[in-house]
Image: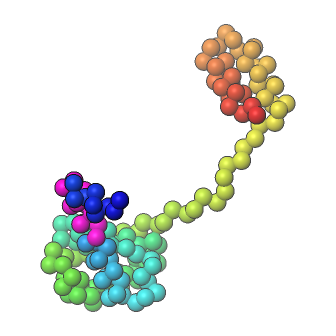
Amino acid sequence: MQLNQIAKHDQQLCHLLQQAQYFQSINQKVKRLLPPNIAPHFRVVCIRDGKLILHASSSMAATRLKMLLPALLIQLQNLDNQILDYQIKVLPENPPNSHEKNFHIPESALVAFSQTAQQMAHHPALHDAICNLVKHHKK
């Protein structure tokens, strides 16, 4: 089922979808105003209190935007009459997970932990924690 069809039945979802489409459109128009080499390094987030909020992926991209945008302010205002100014925030993209955690406790260590847990019977919380560790890492 299309998201638009679902949104017809929920007014809040419909409004949210319209806003997302609007800011996606503004984002594309702003990217067309700027050199193509900077376009992948920022995105339009919203218009708040008359400011067009842009997130840059690095401080270098933010600096470049700060140099270019003053000359384009009138063109930005033509995109939406709510835009009185702009604000650039550096928000780096999260790097992809480099690798999966592959932590393994050797069997001999698990045996030693089990023995330690038995000796810690007089400390129930510690005993239970060690037992849970052993149980979690048993194959």
Taking the magenta stretch, the answer to whether it contains residue 130 is: no
Residue 35 seen in this snapshot: yes
- Out of 65 and 101, give the one closest to the viewer: 101
- The quadrant in which residue 90 appears is bottom left
Q: Which residue is at 72% across, 27% downward?
A: 134
Residue 12 seen in this snapshot: no
* Vertical relation: 50 (above or below) 123: below
Q: Which residue is at 47% across, 72% downward?
A: 58
* Vertical relation: 108 (above or below) 89: above
Q: Main secondary structure of the magenta part?
A: helix
* Vertical relation: 120 (above or below) 137: above
Quarter of the image where the C terminus is located: top right
- The quadrant in which residue 89 appears is bottom left
Q: Position of residue 136 (x, y in %)?
A: 68, 31
Residue at the limit of the structure toward the left, as seen here: 81
- The quadrant in which residue 33 appears is bottom left
**Which region of the structure is painted magenta?**
10-21
Q: Position of residue 72 (x, y in %)?
A: 27, 88
Q: How is the image coloured?
A: rainbow
* Vertical relation: 115 (above or below) 63: above
Q: Which residue is at 82% across, 32% downward?
A: 107
Q: Is residue 92 left or right of residue 134?
A: left
Residue at the limit of the structure toward the top, as seen here: 122
Q: Which residue is at 31% across, 82% downward?
A: 30
Taking the magenta stretch, the answer to whether it contains residue 19 is: yes
